[in-house]
Image: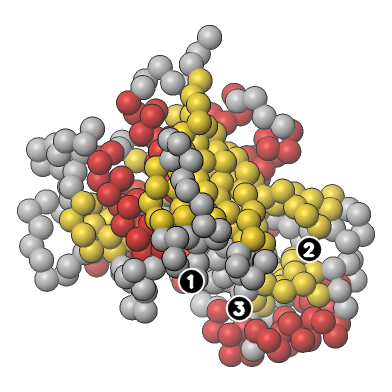
Amino acid sequence: MDKIAPGARPVVLLVTQADHDPDGHDHRTRIAMAERIAALRGGAYAGEFDASARYAVRPYFVPDCTLLLDRADAFGIRGEEDLFGGAVPHAFLANKTISHPLLGAEAVAPRGWSMRLADRLGDAVLPGFSAFSYDDALAAGRRLLEGGRIRLKSPLGIGGGDQAVAADPAELEAALREIGEREVREHGVVIERDLFDPITYSVGRLRLCGACFAYYGTQLSVEDRAGKAVYGGSELVVVRGGFDALEKLEATEAAFTAVRLAARYDAAVAAEFPGFFASRRNYDVAGGADSEGREHIGVLEQSWRIGGATPAELAAVRVLIEDPESAWVAASTHETYRPQKPPPGAHVHFHDPRREDGPVLKYSMVRRHGHPA
């Protein structure tokens, strides 16, 4: 699999963020994943995409973000077979705001916003609103507070960052002031029901190497250097096929519910925005009780780009490709902020024991795989 196949497309990393840190853990992890994808596809990793270069074969792209359709088209990316990630017709589709409706028909909305999407999503998401003006956000937050504690999120935040919890109007106003009117106006804000100690499920679908794979699992939480709970990895079970293939696995009823909600979310977006395509589709689904003791489960957000669970996804895909008898694979990815050695069998993609910010160790593992009886 590590040999380069004749005529194989080179794999390139498409860097869209001008301020990225070339030595940072995120960028170095993306490079490691692009190298893995190249090995899986039988091609070579050709570094960062160079618009001035002449490639003998059209490259396969690994973007660092979800692309807009017109930009994707300019790179020759026209479908799932051209990239590891996705492309959308409007910028807001790439962030958390699409998971919730606006407060009403008169609320401020970005160009291309669809009021119908909320109807398609239904109860696949948690109770909440998205807002693109300070006044709309304040009104939406006050309405949601009538049912208990709420959570405010920056739509661009990752790994659980840029969030605040409010239990009363004063805390709501303080949180909105912290976010700022300009930020709300330019990117929006998500206001949804807060859950106490939720379980966060990861559900996804990949199209890679001419095949389709799906997975479900749970996210891990660790403490960063400041003692704040942040994303610490994912434990996944990966199979061949689409979301429906996951129904054949043994899992808890809550896990099956998470899979069905993610599949509904995915179908709703595809139906409402037919130009959208993605070879990597990941959905975070949270389940837990609110401040009033009511149980909820719903999709929090989507990721149509290389993400935190990607190391585990690719590790499992490799096993499923190399071992046709494997019915499923359990794989995990881990991030830690404490100095430690990688465990035996770990595939390390970032390790810097002396780093002062960010994770110091990131690795993935394949734990076991199943065979049909």
Residue 290 visible in the snapshot: yes
Q: Which of 112 and 366 is in front in this view?
A: 366
Q: Distance between the residues labelled 3 and 1?
A: 31 Å
Q: Residue at x 39, y 28 (%)?
A: 320
Of residues 58 and 105, the one drawn nearer to the viewer in this rendering: 58
- Point out residue 83 in the picture as x, y percentages from the top left corner: 31, 53
Relative side of 49 to 120, left or right: left
Q: In which quarter of the image is residue 243?
A: top right
Q: Name the residue that disc number 3 marks.
A: 188
Residue at (60% x, 67% y) in the render: 225
Disc 3 or disc 2, which is closer to the eye?
2
Residue 286: where, in percent of width, then height? 70, 52
Q: Which dot marks residue 356?
A: 1
Image quadrant in which you'd find residue 177: bottom right
Q: Nearer the viewer, mark 1 or mark 2?
A: 1
Mark 3 or 1, nearer chain start: 3
Are circles 3 and 2 on residues that touch, CB within 8 Å? no
**x and y percent of residue 248 in the render?**
59, 24
Q: What residue type is labelled 1?
A: Glu
Residue marked by disc 2: 194
Bin the neighbour count of mark 1 within 10 Å (Cα to Cα): few under 14, some 14-19, many 20 and up: few
Q: How far apart are labels 1 and 2 at the CA level? A: 31 Å
Relative horizontal placement of residue 141, taking residue 256 as reference (left or right): right
